[in-house]
Amino acid sequence: MSAIAIPGKTKNPALSSTGSRRTMKALVYYGPGKKFWEEKSTPAIVEPTDALVKIQKTTICGTDLHIMKGDVPEVVPGTIIGHEGVGIIEEVGSAVSNFKKGDHVLISCITSCGKCDYCKRGMYSHCENGGWILGHLIDGTQAEYVRIPHADNSLYHIPDGSDEEALVMLSDILPTGFECGVLNGKVQPGSTVAIVGSGPIGLAALLTAQFYSPAQIILIDPDDNRLAVAKKFGATEIINNSKVDPIERVKTLTGNKGADTVIEAVGIPATFELCQSLVAPGGTIANIGVHGKSAELHLERLWAHNITITTRLVDTVTTPMLLKTIQSKKLNSRQLITHHFKLSDIINAYDTFQNAAKEKALKVILTSE
């Protein structure tokens, strides 16, 4: 039966002109450790505020690895994973006013209605009809097509001549490192910053912390390759915590005081507990990591130390500013990219990303064919 156009509604783009259902390829999660690149129905416009985007480039996030380990139980089997990418608008709903078919767009990892109480406070991650839903509560971007709810508030126009690979880093890791780490951590000129974890998120925090000219930025990680990258990106000190006691070393570097800002960029109990031993009196621990297990809070030591502990899911309120800094070449996000794959080779890309130390991997770029 052919599709019937209803006045005031957008035609279902998942149907061809003959009424047959279109299909695409996507990475589908089927439970911890189970993922398959397989054929799925192409998504359709559901609400008039939706847009359908043809993915050009996407990537894999550390959060996706947490999902694959079962750390995010809200992700149900059958979900298409992924929340980052750039693409081209294929179709828009009748209520979308800022975008049209053919526009090149950056996809935000956070979906925002722009109208609820949380959105009006700039807390887009807590949007009452959005937040982090892509690749989490609804199908995501590691696919040939993706449906983006609340398109007017959840997509960004890509300026002509932009480096789209570099802009993929703006979907998530750069605003995450900046908002959850640097801003929540209250990084100040002349301060001391310790970042636990020099993976992509930790490095994003390192790059954006330099906006505020701290006196010291100390990177802590057991991977010498990633520490070397951190040094290249601007770390003043690097500590391999598999070889050196990071607590004693940070005390030595800070006159036995500790760090003013400590950023947790891993998401396991041991690293969060390490942060508690690194923070100076009056300092801030800014958690970025996705935690799937309980971590101990040592109030028996910290109750009188005037410290602040912050948590946050990225709101992406800083994305427009970060886009300008990339366009003006004040921030080089391309340097976070180490590997390239075709989108259809995503299983091998996951193998590379999951073995980051062996493969010397930071961010991988997956390009549609």
Image (spheres, grey):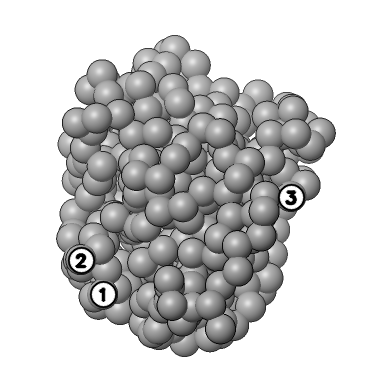
Front label number (2 vs 3): 2
Q: Under tag 3, what secondary structure? A: loop
Which residue carries the number 3 mark? 129
Separation of disc 2 and disc 3 at Cα?
A: 33 Å
Amino acid type, mark 3 = Asn
Amino acid type, mark 2 = Glu
Q: Residue furthest right?
A: 117
Separation of disc 3 and disc 1 at Cα?
A: 31 Å
Residue 118 coordinates in the image, percent (x, y): 77, 36
Which residue carries the number 2 mark? 369
Q: Which residue is at a point 36% across and 66% down the rendered structure image?
A: 144
Vertical side of 327 occupied by 138: above or below: below
Q: Which residue is at a point 77% across and 47% down the rendered structure image?
A: 128
Q: Counting residues from the N terminus, which is met first, the one under dot 2 or under dot 3? A: 3
Separation of disc 1 and disc 2 at Cα?
A: 8 Å
Instruction: Count neighbours of disc 1 (C-alpha within 10 A) and say few if under 14, some if 14 to 19, many if 20 or more.
Output: many
The answer to whether 38 appears left or right of 288 in the picture is: left
Q: Judge whether residue 360 can be spotted in this image.
A: no
Which residue carries the number 1 mark? 344
Residue 1 coordinates in the image, percent (x, y): 56, 83
Amino acid type, mark 1 = Ser
Residue 124 coordinates in the image, percent (x, y): 66, 38
Question: Do the residues under discs 1 and 2 have CB atoms within 8 angstroms?
Answer: yes
